[in-house]
Image (cartoon, rainbow, N blue to C red):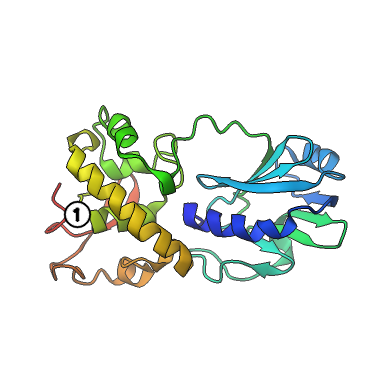
Amino acid sequence: MPEGLEAEIYRRSADHVVARRVARVEVDDHQAMAAELVRELPGRTVEATRRRGKHVLLDLDDGRSLALHFGMTGRLIVDGVSAIDRLEYASGRDDPAWNRLVVTFDDATTLRVNDPRRWAVFTLDPDLARLGPDFLTLDVDDLVVRLGRRRAAVKTILLDQSVVAGFGNMCVDEVLWQSGISPAAPANSLDRARLEAFVAACGEHLPAMLERGGSHTGTLDPEARSAVPPCPRDGAPMRRDTIGGRTTIWCPVHQTG
């Protein structure tokens, strides 16, 4: 599924439409803002792209922003090319029947969101104030405050987009494994040293995964998640548990705190 890393890859792909003027918009009619998007976007020029958590935003010349959220299976396709070759748990087919948004620009460039499950969401000027700080720019002091009063499992808390924006299941498992933190540990049980290790692991491994192509490129890649092999770090049997309703791969030997 598209996590924050995939959203950043999509954002970079969307840079291709910066300075282009919208000529026509087609939107799946199940979208709540379908009529408004069809009416308001033509004639607007994309001035910049941004990302906030799992949202990609196209900033327009009238001061508004078009936000794209890709749900579980949405792909961004610009001029017929998807920036991501492999999206876990989603079809790799580019079926025109799955187009949920098609933006055609005045030079015939196209930007599409293709989503077999119809879970992608498109909005103008979304309220993103509820989102926490971005997962690629975490600050230890902020994390201490955000986790300090929460007793739920740290993995569950980190997947809450109001606490940290951008984490998905695979990235959380990877960084917790790299930093030696149990995904089941109560969030408020982690001392500053543990959180410093977590932030350091984010800074080291998430950018590397981004450059390799996304959240599926970590040590706990989809093959490892399926086979649950011995821990690559210490050789101990890995576990597959359900934490907060999410499948979780972890090592009970070195992920102790």
Find residue 175 and report its horizontal and vertical position in percent.
30, 55
Dot 1 amino acid type: Gly
Q: Is residue 143 above or below residue 116?
A: above
* Secondary element at tag 1: loop
Residue 140 vs residue 223, the one in the foreground: 140
Of residues 222 and 84, which is closer to you in this image? Answer: 84
Position in image of residue 210 (x %, y %): 46, 62
What is the quadrant of residue 117 in the picture? bottom right
Q: Residue at x 24, y 43 (%)?
A: 195
Residue 183 shows up from this direction: no
Q: Is residue 152 above or below residue 29?
A: above
Q: Residue at x 44, y 38 (%)?
A: 133
Horizontal relation, residue 88 to residue 60: left or right: left
Rendered image quadrant of residue 158: top left
User: Where is mark 1, residue-wise?
Assistant: 180
Does residue 9 appear in the picture of this structure?
yes
**Horizontal placement of 202 versus 20: left or right?**
left
Q: 102 left or right of 131?
A: right
Query: Dot 1: within a 10 Å radius of its alpha carbon, few (fewer than 14), some, or many (20 or more) residues?
Result: many
The relative height of residue 113 versus residue 220 in the rendered view (above or below) is above
- Residue 222: horizontal and vertical position, in percent? 38, 68
Mark count: 1
Task: Identify the residue shown where x is 65% and y is 49%.
Answer: 49
Q: Is residue 24 left or right of residue 130?
A: right
Q: Position of residue 233 (x, y in %)?
A: 18, 68
Q: In the rendered view, tell whether residue 3 sits above or below residue 154.
A: below
Which quadrant holds residue 221?
bottom left
